[in-house]
Amino acid sequence: MSSPEGSSVLFRRPPATLRRAVITGFARQLQKEVAKGRPFGVLITGDAELRRLNRDFRGKDYATDVLSFASGMGGAPHLGELAISLGRARAQAREFGHLLEDEVRILMLHGVLHLLGHDHETDTGQMARAEKRWRAKLKLPNGLIERVQV
C-alpha cells in the first residue's frame, strides 16, 4: 500500500465528506513525526471489511474502528498497515461532536502507535500517555484510550 513518496491512503469508496488531501497529508505528517520516517499504509473502508479482518486476524466477529497490522520485522523500513472503518469513524465523530476528518486522524494516530509496538490493553498507561502527548502536538480532540477511561 505504500507509495514511493512514503505513507499512503487507499479509499475503497472515497466519501464526499472527507478531503483526501487532508488525510494523506496527515499520514505523511505521522510518518515524519511519530513513525520517525517509516512509511505505513492506510485502508479506509467499511464496517463489513473491518468485521471480516477482525474475525480473520483477531478471532473477534464484530466491526471495529481501527486495526493495525505491524510489518513483523522490527527494523523493516515499512512500519505496517492500518485499516479504518469509515462507518465507525462517522458514528464516533457524531458521538463526540467533532469532524469526520478529526476522527479519522485520531484513528490513524492510535493505529500508528500500535504499529510502533504500543498496546493499551497490556501496558501500564504508556500508550495512553504517548497518545495524549501526540494529540496535543497534532491539535486533535480526545483520543480513543482517553474516551474509554473517562
Image (spheres, rainbow, N blue to C red):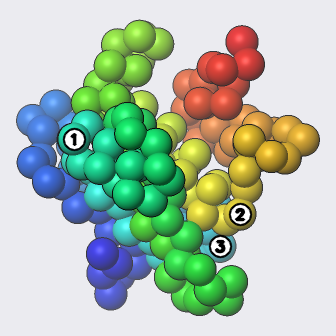
Work out whether 36 lies above or below 20: below
Image point 72% across, 50% down: which residue? 119
> Of callouts 2 and 1, which one flags the residue occurring earlier in the amino acid sequence?
1
In this rendered view, identify the residue nearer to me: 52 or 36. Answer: 52
- The residue pinned by badge 2 equals 117
From the viewer's perspective, tell me whether residue 41 is left or right of residue 127. Answer: left
Characterize the local packing of mark 1: few (<14), some (14-19) or many (20 or more) Cα atoms within 10 angstroms.
some
What's the residue type where badge 3 is placed?
A: Lys
From the viewer's perspective, tell me whether residue 123 is left or right of residue 87. Answer: right
Image point 59% across, 30% down: which residue? 144
3D distance between C-alphas at marks 1 and 3: 32 Å
Q: Please, what secondary structure does the residue beneath circle 2 have? A: loop
3D distance between C-alphas at marks 2 and 3: 13 Å
3D distance between C-alphas at marks 2 and 1: 26 Å
Residue 104 sits in quarter:
top left
Q: Which of the two marks, 1 or 3, is nearer to us in this view? A: 1
Residue 37 sits in quarter:
bottom right
- Residue 29 visible in this rendered orientation of the protein: no
Characterize the local packing of mark 2: few (<14), some (14-19) or many (20 or more) Cα atoms within 10 angstroms.
few
Looking at the figure, which quarter contains the C terminus?
top right
Q: Which of the two marks, 2 or 1, is nearer to us in this view? A: 1
Residue 115 rendering spot, x and y as whole percentages: 60, 63
- The residue pinned by badge 3 equals 36
Residue 19 sits in quarter:
top left
Residue 90 rendering spot, x and y as whole percentages: 29, 25
In this rendered view, identify the residue nearer to me: 81 or 31. Answer: 81
From the viewer's perspective, tell me whether residue 99 is left or right of residue 37. Answer: left
> Of callouts 2 and 3, which one flags the residue occurring earlier in the amino acid sequence?
3
Looking at the figure, which quarter contains the N terminus?
bottom left
- The residue pinned by badge 1 equals 48
**Do the numbered discs 2 and 3 sit on residues whose CB atoms are within 8 Å?**
no
Image point 23% across, 61% down: which residue? 10
